[in-house]
Image: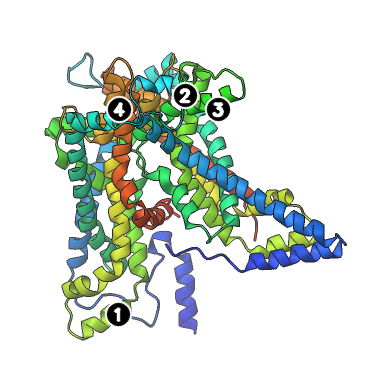
Amino acid sequence: MTDIARPDEPVAAVAAVNAVEASSGAPKRTGRAKETARKILVWIPLILLVVWTVTPFLVTLSVSFKQRAEVFADPGLIPSNPTFDAYGEVLASDSFTTSFVNSLIVGGGTTALSILIGVPAAYAFARFRFRGRHLLLLFTLLPRLVPSLGLMVPIYRLAVVAGLLDKRITLIIVYTAMLLPLAVWLMVGFFQQIPREIEEAASVDGASLWGRLRYIVAPLAAPAMITIGVLAFREAWNEFTLVLVLTNTPGKRTLPFELYLMQGIEGIANFPGEAAFTILTILPFILVYTRIEKYVVAGLVTGSGK
Amino acid sequence: MTATTASKSKRNGARWWQRSAPPPGRDNTAVIGQSKSTPYLFTLPAILLVAAVLGFPVLYGVFQSLFRAPSLGAPVEWVSFENYADMFSSDDFWHSLNKTAVFVFGSLIVGTVLGLFFAFALFRVLGRLRFLRAVTVAPYIISNVAAAVMFRILFNSQFGTVNRVIEFFGLDGPSWLAKPGLAMLVVIFTQVWTDLPLTILLLLGGLMTIDQAHLDAALVDGADGWTRARHITIPLLAPQLLISTVWLSYSTLTGLGVVLALTGGGPLKATQTMAMEMYSVAFRSLEFNRALAIATFILIVNALLTLGYVGIGRRFEYDQ
């Protein structure tokens, strides 16, 4: 994803506006007032955008610093007696710690496996000519259209028969497969942009296929691989519908599943607990967000299958 | 010259899966150092994994929807389309179809309107504020369950911020998640909140490809902002609107996470979409084969809707 540069054309548009206004004989001062009014009008939707996106986060953050009893008595955004009780409670609970570790392992595994399998496949599709190439690429990309809802029952039934329930490796394999069509699609486009001549030159100088992959292709493809890694980790970290059916024992679940269970288990809703759990679930992303954001955007835009 | 023309016309006549025939005059048949089996060694793991985890289970699911266990735990028997017949004669199914229509089209309308609004707003300040782009994308990194928790706090009848704002204006805030009509509204807003980043980015990308000359011409002709948006920008955005519509529709039709974590289909089944219905039939009633019939139906509806959107999109596209 290249950075978005503002096109020069709007300058022309502004010039045209000024020309139209000048020709209609409007006094200059009205024009300037209009300009100011327009500038304010530009900002109102942007402020609404920030409010729309950020409010749910802020409200959750606020509730997470309150006492259970206080939530109802003190509904203000800034807690009057901020406390870390909810965080302490969540961090001390097995449901959080084990699912956090599970999510880390499944996320790391999915990331590694997606890159390990997806990158060579994409390289082959982009560089090599071989029989059945287009059909095989189609077979790899088309399952992208399969919703996880359609997989829930069949995968559950197959996992029961194969004895693969409650295993992290099952989740890793399933999430990797769900990510592969996107990863291959993204990387094929990327590899096609790397000039073939670079590799041919290296080849003439005696570099083997492995040497070229290791010293030329991999460094050039690093940004695209990071994108895939971020998307893979995000998928594994957030996925809910399949982990819901593929695990059913405490200690085997990932974070979204435990958060889902937290809502129902206690008779009275523990809002600060849920809020703290939510915040802690997002925290790893928030910490590195400014660094990964551009990769997320790149993956998001490519992933829409344009 | 004639050879080039011949090869060109042949390429134009070729079917789409043959389209990248090697260009003439250049040997693209192999990368130096490539052996015959290398491409297959590289691609096979990916193909096998995708086929085993995505391709096979879906086909297996469609096939299994033609079977049924006479009693719980008994081996399944071939019943042809009986599961589908039962599905179409069940009130619960029609109820969920109804709710799905509200959910899908409600999310489409809210999502497209908000997406356009925010995309236009961002387009005005393009390139100057990376911060805004980061904010826009933030909901994408949140799981559906986390979004549901956030919105349940936001819309809580006693301490939720939404009701606090309503009370500020001297009105009584409703109990959003306890009233059937309002619960669906909250579900729609939560779903749109999670899906909006992609819609905004898609539409923003579309806006950036629009040739400014069209707008300048209209401006000189004296068209006001709304007229320009209505008659020039939005028709030129048709391709991006189509993609975002297909995506939003797919994501809501097959989306389970938000509904399950936010309302679980309640209150009084007011948010029992087809996805929820499939989940309940499968994992609460344990009638897996009946659930597979519903899942297959959802896949078919999704395909038909996509074709429908493409058809409508074609009609609105500009002939350039």
Check if mark 1's residue and mark 4's residue have beta carbons within 8 Å: no
* Residue farthest along the right direction in this orientation: A25
Q: Check contact, mark 3 vs mark 2: CB within 8 A.
A: no
Judge depth for marks 1 and 4 and give the one in front: 4
Q: Nearer the viewer, residue B242 or B71?
A: B242
Residue picked out by circle 2: B97
What is the number of the mark on residue B165? 3
Tell me the mark number nearer the camera, choosing from 4 and 2.
4
Q: Quote the CA–CA distance across marks 4 and 2.
A: 35 Å
Quarter of image, res B168: top right
Q: What crowding class fits label 2: few (fewer than 14 Cα within 10 Å), some (14-19), or many (20 or more)?
A: some
Characterize the local packing of mark 1: few (<14), some (14-19) or many (20 or more) Cα atoms within 10 angstroms.
few
What subunit carries mark 3?
B
A106 or A24: nearer the viewer: A24
Percent of width and height locating residue A209: 18, 74
Rendered-image quadrant of the C terminus of chain B: bottom right
